[in-house]
């Protein structure tokens, strides 16, 4: 039950994106890094549980950015699709830079693609840094309706496991408020960039989840998770931990091993993306649990990568 918060409210940053990845803790993921060829221009973590090795958030050397949230289902098992949602994100981030694909062209092609209907429900935010971003879902009533955001300064919005615009989730409302406050206080205090990252991590770590009996499962918590930005570890550890070799050999049929969507669940990774008008990007990610569901000591799971994006063209969004 992830959350993504997007803002253009900071005077020094054209775009800020922060994200909590909430997942079953035995589901293996990589650390954020530049991907291997032929996609060495893509930066982000990868889901190692499925053969597509998709991602939920990433950025490219050309300034493409994407973040995905899935849809909440009545039961956790219903959220698993035949294809990986991460493959949709990959298709945006990994398209060859020489193609100069516009955001509008990509979203329209995705909406028309039968493959998008064969994955679990999702909302995808995608676009280019310093340009409007598109939000599109494969569960909306009118899939041709594309919402454009980050089109002007002083916008802050949240997206979680429901359709964009659903204001009934407390974590979205609270997340927007806390992010705006963190940015405002950072500016007023004239703090450095590290302090901004820390303030944004504090937003992502806001835990207001009601506590149920110790033996309660994720399905018991489903109706409460919309209340909390951060999800502490819940459930019981019934999953069988996988070895490092197993994470490198996902099922050949593309389906995910059942042990990767059971057992302990919680916020596994926290990501902060800061982008400036000159193209400078700082990509910070904190890993809270390793692939064996062990807690990572504070700071030891941090990774930060900085680079300057080189846009494909002066204007590529097509909007």
Image (spheres, helix red, strand yellow):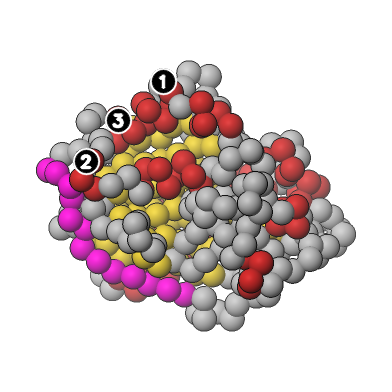
In this rendering, is residue 220 above or below 168?
below
Q: Is residue 305 magenta?
A: yes
Query: Mark 1: which secondary structure?
Result: loop
x then y, percent, for residue 28: 61, 63
Q: Position of residue 221 (x, y in %)?
A: 76, 49
Residue 224 seen in render: yes
Q: Is residue 319 above or below residue 95?
A: above
> Disc number at residue 100?
2
Describe residue 278's horizontal placement relative to residue 154 as left or right. Answer: left
Q: Nearer the viewer, residue 126 or 80?
A: 80
| Residue corresponding to mark 1 | 144
**Front-most of 182 and 68?**
68
Judge whether residue 285 is colored magenta: no
* CA separation in Å, label 3 and label 1: 11 Å
Q: Tell me the magenta residue range.
A: 302-314
| Residue behind mark 3 | 104
User: How far apart are the two marked residues, 2 and 3, measured between alpha carbons?
Assistant: 12 Å
Q: Are marks 2 and 3 in contact (CB under 8 Å)?
A: no
- Residue depicted at x 54% and y 70%: 287
């Amino acid at each position: 039950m992830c959350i993504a918060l997007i803002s253009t409210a900071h005077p020094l940053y054209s775009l800020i994106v922060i994200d909590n990845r909430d997942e079953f803790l035995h589901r293996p993921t990589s650390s954020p890094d530049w991907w291997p060829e032929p996609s060495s221009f893509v930066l982000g973590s990868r889901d190692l549980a499925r053969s597509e090795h998709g991602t939920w958030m990433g950025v490219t050397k050309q300034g493409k950015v994407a973040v995905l949230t899935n849809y909440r289902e009545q039961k956790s098992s219903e959220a698993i699709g035949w294809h990986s949602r991460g493959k949709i994100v990959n298709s945006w981030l990994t398209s060859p830079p020489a193609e100069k694909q516009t955001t509008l062209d990509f979203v329209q092609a995705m909406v028309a693609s039968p493959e998008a209907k064969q994955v679990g429900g999702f909302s995808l935010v995608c676009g280019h840094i310093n340009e409007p971003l598109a939000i599109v879902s494969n569960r909306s009533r009118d899939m041709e309706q594309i919402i454009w955001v980050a089109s002007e300064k002083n916008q802050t919005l949240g997206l979680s496991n429901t359709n964009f615009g659903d204001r009934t989730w407390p974590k979205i409302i609270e997340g927007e408020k806390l992010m705006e406050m963190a940015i405002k206080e950072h500016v007023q205090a004239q703090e450095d960039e590290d302090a901004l990252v820390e303030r944004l991590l504090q937003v992502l770590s806001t835990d207001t989840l009601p506590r149920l009996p110790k033996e309660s499962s994720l399905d018991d918590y489903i109706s409460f998770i919309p209340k909390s930005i951060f999800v502490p570890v819940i459930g019981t550890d019934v999953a069988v931990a996988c070895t490092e070799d197993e994470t490198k050999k996902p099922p050949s049929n593309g389906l995910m091993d059942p042990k990767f969507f059971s057992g302990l669940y919680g916020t596994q990774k926290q990501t902060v993306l800061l982008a400036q008008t000159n193209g400078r990007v700082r990509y910070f990610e904190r890993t809270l649990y390793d692939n064996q569901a062990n807690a990572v000591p504070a700071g030891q799971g941090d990774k930060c990568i900085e680079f300057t994006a080189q846009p494909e063209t002066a204007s590529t969004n097509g909007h």
